[in-house]
Amino acid sequence: MSPRLRLPPLALAFLLLAACGRHDRPGDEEQVLHQGVGADPNDLDPQIVSSNQAAAISMALGEGLTNYDPADLHPVPGVAESWDVSADGLAYTFHLRANARWSNGEPVTAEDFVFSARRLLSPAFAGEFAYMMFPIRGAEDFATGRTRDFGQVGVRAPDARTLRYELHRPAPYFLTLTAHWCWYPVPAATLLRHGRIDQPGTAWTRPENFVGNGAFALKSWRQGEGVVVAPNPWYWDAPRVRLRGIHFHFIDNPDTEERAFRNGQLQITSSMPPGRLGAYRGTPGGVLRATPAFETDVLYLNLGRRPLDDVRVRRALSLAIDRDALTSAVLRDGSVPAASLVPDDPHGYAYRGEPRLRFDPAEARRLLAAAGFPAGRGFPPLELSFPNGGLAGPLCEALQQMWRRHLGVDVGLVGQERRVFIDNVHAHRFTLSLSGWIGDYLDPMSFLDVYLSASGHNDPGYRNPEFDQLLEQAAGTAGRELRYERFQQAEAMLLRDLPSLPLNHRPNLHLVAPSVHGYADNLMDMHPYPAIWLESK
């Protein structure tokens, strides 16, 4: 084996800078964006898509009543050109654009949104994001089968261009909810030609069948390769769309993706190998985007499996984790240790209560002994599953070593292909799993409602009526100060019961070519494509 040439950091930085120049090429004049989106998506159905990477495709193909402002994510008009909110915050009336169209030229109507709400909330559809509609009157009862009459759900279409939502409690973040992809309308006529309203995974999302209402239309979708979209001429704001196409590339390995960027094959990556951060930080031009994220990496614990059903064991596992060492010695990507679950948000929420996550091996050993496993004796073998690629493996190896060293506990590691991993976690086919959560809207509720008993994302299987009631009270509280106080109480309950073990708050890390304009960094990593264009310097 021949030795590899090791370049000094400065030389590497110059090489990377030269490589970045390849993105400023005449092809940019064609306005075709090439973007990495990680692994293959589980679907292109906006009511099924479950990852932020796949959501990028959904945001090209569809649009909600509201949209995200690229800079600070405040809600701006989308399919709805305006809206009215009742004085008590319990009714939202949206006025749809007269020129809102599907990609087949048919008008988008208020009834399309009623149909889509019924589909997402249908118990047989089992939509993971159905709980995001639970502020709507009667939505939870319909989704959980307590009523079969959708007429009891507070979604109305008085006419083709008027849509009204009636809530059972105030939801100050409601206008941001309606920008989320799970609220996008789905085309009833197209969908019903390929299955029932509550039937997931049908052929309606194949390129030859797909109909959307976004700025782009689906041209091709090849498993293991990518998705290609072209401008939708029927989009209501089509004249503002400058991109003439987007190629979404499925590349699940950060190193492979980074090489594709250097070679000029990508203009935006979905991730960044931490080992290359130092070199890119030395290059001018803003190629490396490293910004705070509304995100927490966590370990999910399957509470239905022994001994994880014992809170003393869960606390022992948490106390034996040196989160400072994980971020400084393993991740080295700008992550910060998590002392709580919810990241600080720009509206002023920051957890200040007790308990807080800490590293205390002595207390961990005491708790494990109290649970019947002194020095780890008699502790059953556990498995920690994780998605292959990136730093997931090294992170899990570090956790494995910490538990062995501090508790005498052996945990096996199981790496899985990302789609298999996600399916297994959602089906509760795991004992411990390395996961993460990115807020769907800028509010503590976006992290806490995951653990509601009826949440489709409650992968640990946490069931606590007291928590459900407290979160319901917090969500319906109008005043921010009292609302945040109740959120603090709810988060304290989670940190006491530990259905998951928060590890760190990770930043957004991307490589973005200098020719990409209108791509604004923000906490939720949302980038509406009508605002983006290519221009070589």
Image: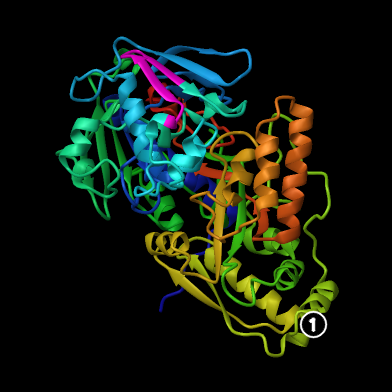
Give the residue displayed 85% in from the left and 75% down from the top: 362
Q: Kindly identify the amino acid type of the residue bearing the numbered disc 1.
A: Ala
State the image coordinates of residue 168 (x, y, percent, origin top left).
57, 29
Please determine whether, in this image, residue 282 is positioned above or below residue 529: below
Give the residue displayed 37% in from the left and 49% down from the top: 260
Mark 1 Cα shell of 10 Å, populated few (<14), some (14-19), many (≥20): some
Q: Is residue 159 magenta?
A: yes
In which quarter of the view is residue 462 placed? bottom right
Q: Quadrant of the C terminus?
A: top left
Give the residue displayed 42% in from the left and 22% down from the top: 65
Q: Nearer the viewer, residue 78 or 57?
A: 78
Q: Is residue 300 left or right of residue 214?
A: right
Please determine whether, in this image, residue 44 is positioned above or below residue 359: above
What is the magenta range?
A: 152-164
For the question of whether residue 22 can be seen, the reply is no
Q: Is residue 295 magenta?
A: no
Please determine whether, in this image, residue 43 is positioned above or below residue 89: below
State the image coordinates of residue 483 (x, y, percent, origin top left).
74, 32
Instruction: Give the SS element for disc 1.
Output: helix
For the question of whether residue 395 can be seen, the reply is yes
Q: Which residue is mark 1?
A: 369
